[in-house]
Image (cartoon, grey):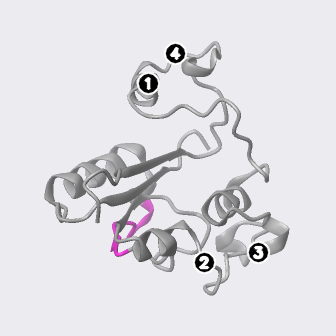
Amino acid sequence: MKPSTPNILYFVCHDLGRHLGIYDALVQSPHLDAFARAGTVFTQAYCNSPCCSPSRACAMTGRYAQSTGAIGLSHMGWSLDQSEPTITEYLKEAGYETAHAGLAHERVPGENHYEVEMEGKWEDWNTHRAVDQAIAYLENRDRSRPFYLNIGTQEVH
């Protein structure tokens, strides 16, 4: 693994859209704006599905929801099929440790193929709990490998 391999932290505020100050929205979001400025801000990125599970499935697979079958809420029978590869599998193959805290709504909890899974109960979806779990992971992770950490929250939903 090259020393220049970047760590990846993917933070999803459920159904937030572009309603952040960093995108010139009339919303005060100083902490998320500072977080975004410290990383990468996508100004021409678009979602291929308007809500919840289909949107997450698109982001995780790079495919349209109608192509993967994830066309509704995962917990209501529209879960992304286990055979459908996601960025998680590709990053593991590239040597990344994959971890998840909070809400991952492309599949039902526990079936998302992360090496480190911190989503165990409903309370884990709340921002403060998901962020606390992510921080604990970052403090104690295997530092010999780069990481991909997916953090999802149920707020703003």
Relative height, residue 55 to residue 109 (above, below): above
Segment colored magenta: 115-122
Number of callouts in the render?
4
* Front in this rendered view, residue 53 or 96: 96
Q: In the rendered image, which residue does mark 4 sit on?
A: 28
Q: In the rendered image, which residue does mark 1 sit on?
A: 37
> What separation in Å lies between label 1 and label 3 (alpha carbons)?
33 Å
Q: Which comes sooner in the sequence, label 3 or label 4?
A: 4
Residue type beneath disc 2: Pro
Residue type beneath disc 1: Arg
Which residue occupies 70% across, 55% down? Answer: 55
> What separation in Å lies between label 1 and label 4 (alpha carbons)?
15 Å
Q: In the rendered image, which residue does mark 2 sit on?
A: 85
Q: Nearer the viewer, mark 1 or mark 4?
A: 1
Which residue occupies 45% across, 68% down? Answer: 91
Which residue occupies 58% across, 24% down? Answer: 20
Dominant secondary structure, magenta: loop
